[in-house]
Image (tube, rainbow, N blue to C red):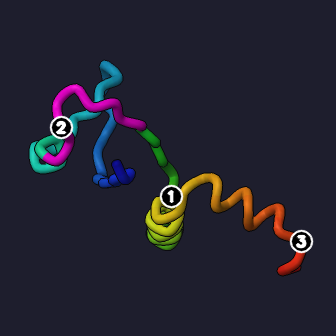
Amino acid sequence: MAMKTVDFNGELTANGQITVPPEIAAQVPRGETIQVVILWGVSDDDAWRTAGRKQFEAAYADDVYEVLIDDTSTQ
């Protein structure tokens, strides 16, 4: 299955919880393992750059990166 991503702005409550908006939670199948990344202190420009890179990287498998890194014929 292809990796899917979604992001939203939220707040960490005083008791250390993050509420996932219902429309976001509805996109994730129940029982699915998820990965959580927390960013703070990010400017709007940084947020767009981070989101764009995440989408770009999601399109490629990890082994493709290894081939590109190790391929000295293109350097």
Q: CA distance from mark 1 to mark 3?
A: 35 Å
The amino acid type of the residue labelled 3 equals: Thr
What residue is drawn where x is 53% and y is 62%? 60
Q: Nearer the viewer, residue 54 or 64?
A: 64
* Residue at the spot of label 2: 29
Label 2 vs label 1, nearer the camera: 2
Numbered badge on residue 12? none
The amino acid type of the residue labelled 1 equals: Val
| Majority SS type along the magenta span | loop
- Residue 44 is situated, as x and y percent measured from the top left of the image, at 44, 69
Q: Secondary structure at mark 2?
A: loop
- Residue 40 is situated, as x and y percent measured from the top left of the image, at 48, 48
Numbered badge on residue 42? 1
Look at the image and give the residue range highlighted in magenta: 27-35
What residue is drawn where x is 35% and y is 23%? 16
Q: CA distance from mark 2 to mark 1?
A: 29 Å
Label 2 vs label 3, nearer the camera: 3
Q: Hey, which quadrant is residue 33 in on the image? A: top left
Local crowd at mark 1 within 10 Å, few (<14), some, or many (≥20)? few
Q: Nearer the viewer, residue 12 or 57?
A: 57
Local crowd at mark 3 within 10 Å, few (<14), some, or many (≥20)? few
Q: Residue furthest top?
A: 15
* Residue at the spot of label 3: 72
Label 2 close to label 3 by CB (< 8 Å) = no
Relative to 12, is 48 above or below?
below
Query: Would you say 30 lies left or right of 57 here?
Result: left
Q: Secondary structure at mark 1?
A: loop
